Amino acid sequence: MRAAMFYGPGDVRIEETPDPRPGPGEVVVRIDRALTCGTDLKTYRRGHPTIIKSLPSPFGHEFAGPVVTVGAGVDPGRWPVGTRVVAANSAPCNRCHACKVGRQSLCENLEFLNGAYAEYIAVPARIVEQNLYAIPDGLSDEAAALTEPLACAVHGVAESGIVVGDTVVVNGAGPIGLMFVRLAALSGARVICCDLSAARLAVARELGAAETLVIGEGVDQVAAVRALTPDGRGADVAIEAVGLPEVWEATVRMVRPGGLVNLFGGAKGGTSFSVSTELLHYSELTIKGVFHHTPRYVATALDLLRDGAVPSAPFLSGERPLAALVETLEATGRQEGIKYAIVPAAA
């Protein structure tokens, strides 16, 4: 089969690789659609500290398609050949300390799955058991492939304590930021979204943002956001969905006293940010990082897509063949479109 292989930052190659065969408890899925992702873009540019364990590595993690074969021990009644499925890119062990205290996203033995940018993929037994889902009738493969990133945003909103009537600012209108916008609006919040791209902010409005702010040279983003909040006191919740330390710092300064800051965007390894001790202490701020998802949030995300509460169309900017993967990742890095569906079978 044809598959994208990651050899290192800036080096992704489309190669002929052996077709996967299912081991015990595994299923092999034909990938009809795989989606580009901000995490994949960052991985392409600089590698990744957790999801890439060795080189060269299969690449990509958002996909959907039909089951084509199953391994020993898999119930064929549960996963008959031809069933359209979507899988998360990980599964927890449910045995370590983090899992036992209900923090599955921090599992010490989290098993990751890469290889969505390919014609076929073997889904590991642990993911088959916990994080493989039949796609509901009426939901397209490309829409279903949004499940994994949406699960991350569902986790982020669940950890943010948003209540009806809150003012929430979301910094970043990439795919995850836009998902935060939609989920916060569904929670009854008044949402402000900031980004460099006016086109992406138009999508944020479509998804429920009440206010949008184009960030450009000479714009005091913190002051501009606070001016959009009641009495200028700051947002109740501020979410960073960019992954830049300077945006982390600005996000902290956007909340009201007693507010919560969710630093969701993963920054480059080895970087740090600073926060005023006076601001943190005397304003009693809550600052937290949120990472990844859990099986519960994956199932919730698929339900939201199935029911149309989170529409798929605003996130999908078109289809591209596997051969155009690198070009497509670079395009998303230039903020051209939101997410693209990679079609491995396309010429």
Image (cartoon, grey):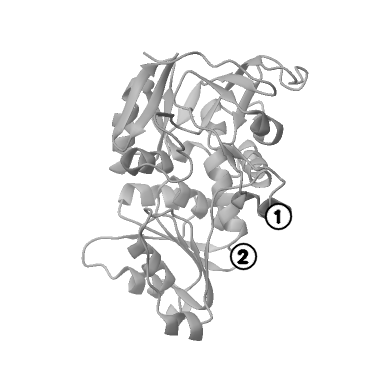
Amino acid under label 2? Gly
Residue at the image point whose x is 53% and y is 65% from the top: 288
Identify the element where label 1 is drawn. loop
Horizontal and vertical percent for residue 159?
A: 60, 60
Q: Is residue 67 above or below residue 310?
A: above
Say which quadrant the C terminus sits in.
Answer: top left
Secondary element at tag 2: loop
Picture coordinates of residue 20, whole percent (x, y): 54, 16
| Residue located beneath label 1 in the image | 102
Mark pair 2, 1: CA separation: 17 Å
Within 10 Å of disc 1 (Cα), the crowding (few <14, some 14-19, many 20+) is few
Disc number at residue 145?
none
Give left or right: position of 99 versus 77: left
The one nearer the camera, 185 or 95, is 95
Vertical comparison of 103 with 116: above or below:
below
Q: Hey, which quadrant is residue 58 in on the image? A: top left
Identify the residue at image location x=36%, y=18%: 15
Comes first in the chain, label 2 or label 1: 1
On the image, numbered disc 2 is attached to which residue?
161
